[in-house]
Structure formats: C-alpha cells, structure tokens
Image (tube, rainbow, N blue to C red):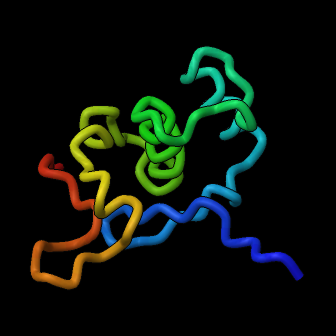
Amino acid sequence: MADETGLLLYVDGRPYNANDLTLNEVEEIEDACGGVALEQLDFARAKVLKAIVYTLLKRDDPEVTMDRVGAIKLRALLRGPETNGDGVAAQSAITS
C-alpha cells in the first residue's frame, strides 16, 4: 500500500494533514490563489501555504486572521515541534 501521509503541517503543536481537506476547502484555497487548480499550485509559494494553513485553522478557530497565519514560522510549520527549547511548533507571535 502506498504511503498516504500527504502534506503534514504543524500549527500550535498540532499536526494537520492537507489530504483531509474537503472539496469546499480546496475550492476556497484555489480561489485565494487566483483560481489555480490545487494540482497546479506551487506549494513552495508563501501565498499557497498561507491559504492552506488559514483554511485548516478555520476549522477550529473561525476568527483566525491572515495576519496570525502570516506570523507562523515556516521551519516550525513544516517540521513540527522544535526540540531545542525554541517553543511550540508554529506558535505565532500574535496572541488572542
């Protein structure tokens, strides 16, 4: 069986799997990225990552803002929790 891990992102210490996006969420991401189809998106672009993270965070926090998403560190977002005492993975500098 093939590995179905997909794009795993860590936000506030919690893993989110982009493979779990609903079709409505995919459409929202595509719209935020100029109508480009998900399969054609460049996941190395900040705009694409921000749209994905924003959409995933909205599940738990409907009040999340793009400013909060923009403050998340890329290293923590892709690697998960830091082990060198730097804090919780992808914890933004902006607090509620």
Is residue 46 toward the left or the right of residue 75 in the image?
A: right
Seen as rendered, the residue at the extreme right is 1
Expressed as whole percent of the image width and height from the top left, the position of residue 42 reads: 57, 34
Residue 66, above or below 71: above
Q: Residue at x 84, y 76 (%)?
A: 2
Q: Nearer the viewer, residue 2 or 72?
A: 2
Expressed as whole percent of the image width and height from the top left, the position of residue 3 reads: 76, 76
Dividing the picture into quarters, in which one does residue 29 lie? top right
Expressed as whole percent of the image width and height from the top left, the position of residue 92 reads: 20, 53
Is residue 64 toward the left or the right of residue 53 in the image?
A: left
Is residue 94 toward the left or the right of residue 22 in the image?
A: left
Is residue 86 toward the left or the right of residue 90 in the image?
A: left
Residue 67, above or below 17: above
Q: Nearer the viewer, residue 67 or 76?
A: 76
Q: Residue at x 28, y 68 (%)?
A: 89
* Number of callouts: 0
Q: Residue at x 38, y 69 (%)?
A: 79
Seen as rendered, the residue at the extreme top is 34
Dividing the picture into quarters, in which one does residue 39 lie? top right
Q: Residue at x 63, y 21 (%)?
A: 31
Name the quarter where the N terminus is drawn: bottom right
Q: Nearer the viewer, residue 67 or 75?
A: 75
Expressed as whole percent of the image width and height from the top left, the position of residue 96 reads: 17, 49
